[in-house]
Amino acid sequence: MKTILVTGATAGFGAAFARRFVRDGHRVIATGRRVERLEALAKELGENLLPAPLDVTDANSVAGFLDTLPEAWRRIDVLVNNAGLALGLSPAWEADLADWDRMIATNISGLVHMTRAILPGMVERDDGVILNLGSVAGEYPYPGGHVYGGTKAFVRQFSLNLRADLVGKNIRVTDIEPGMVGGSEFSQVRFHGDEAKAAAVYAGITPLNPDDIAEAASWIVSLPKHMNINRIEMMPTCQASGPFAVKRD
Ligand code: NDP
Ligand code: 8X3
């Protein structure tokens, strides 16, 4: 049984990870800002789910987080840096700077601070797995992707650079890079609660769903210590990369 810390477990992938890991026989520390959702998850999953409210953008809370946990839950075997968001899809020159700042604070600073808080214990024990939620947006540009894609490119390179420091240790790092995934709150958040715009993203397609991503995470966590999956990129079959955009007169 591993102790798995999941950030952003109140919705989407994070809730699916919590359910899947508990089903796999592990125990999960579920974090996020919406406390009532964490409590509902604890009620659903029982004693192997510890609800622990945390805003990853609050550097002091992140730095002191381990000390707030019951003693028996402080040895983190797996860190899932899942909390993240996209905000807006308008062209860069019209984008809201506050949206850009919040994406950077959550997807980059939050993830980096969580990693810095948990990694020393893993190094001390020479044992651990870090799963970072990147995205195909970190690899393939698209209009309106500007800062969101930039944050996910950071997540990919940070993940690979962590491995460069950790070479030879039994600490594995994977960047999970999904394409379109429905059934989470990702698009509602991106469009600031506009349900019609969010629904239009998945109209007429069968996207991946959070359980598909949890399937990959479950597999990675189950692998032997000598195996590191550096990156795993996945898309629904209705999605593929396109040609370069060329503007002709
Ligand atoms: P959701 O919006 O459904 O879930 C996001 C989670 O992040 C929520 O639990 C939310 O919890 C949490 N969160 C957001 N901000 C903070 C914060 N400051 N502190 C703590 N938790 C926070 O999105 P998804 O499940 O779809 O996305 C999960 C991850 O996967 C993200 O990093 C996203 O970028 C990435 N991803 C998503 C894809 C998709 O198509 N859905 C594809 C590729 C990658 P709360 O609000 O309660 O704090
Ligand atoms: C989420 C996938 O294509 O909306 O990271 O950026 S996409």
Image (spheres, grey):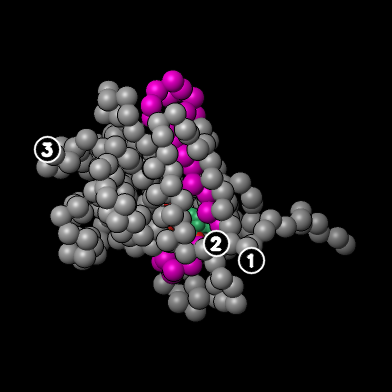
Query: Separation of disc 2 and disc 3 at Cα?
Result: 39 Å
- Residue at horizontal 21 percent and vertical 54 percent from the top: 49
Q: Is residue 50 left or right of residue 7?
A: left
178 in the magenta segment: yes
The disc at residue 71 is 3
Q: Is residue 13 left or right of residue 66?
A: right
- Residue at horizontal 48 percent and vertical 34 percent from the top: 228
SS for tag 3? helix
Q: Position of residue 241 (x, y in %)?
A: 69, 56
Q: Residue type at mark 3: give it.
A: Glu
The mark closer to the camera, 2 or 1, is 1
Quadrant of image for the N terminus = top left
- Residue at horizontal 38 percent and vertical 26 percent from the top: 170
Task: Find disc 2 in the rendering and name its residue.
Answer: 180
Quadrant of image for the C terminus = bottom right
The disc at residue 72 is none
Q: Is residue 185 above or below residue 242?
A: below
Dots 2 and 1: beta carbons under 8 Å? yes
Residue in the foreground of this view, choosing between 180 and 46: 46
Q: Is residue 159 visible?
A: no
185 in the magenta segment: yes
Q: Residue type at mark 1: give it.
A: Cys
* Range covered by the magenta-colored residues: 161-190
Residue at disc 3, CB closer than 8 Å to ligand 1 = no
Label 3: how many residues lie within 10 Å, few (<14), some (14-19) or many (20+)? few
Label 2: how many residues lie within 10 Å, few (<14), some (14-19) or many (20+)? many
Task: Find disc 1 in the rendering and name its residue.
Answer: 238
Q: Position of residue 66 (x, y in %)?
A: 20, 38
Residue in the foreground of this view, choosing between 113 and 38: 38
SS for tag 2? loop
- Label 1 or label 3, whichever comes before in sequence order: 3
Q: Is residue 173 left or right of residue 51?
A: right
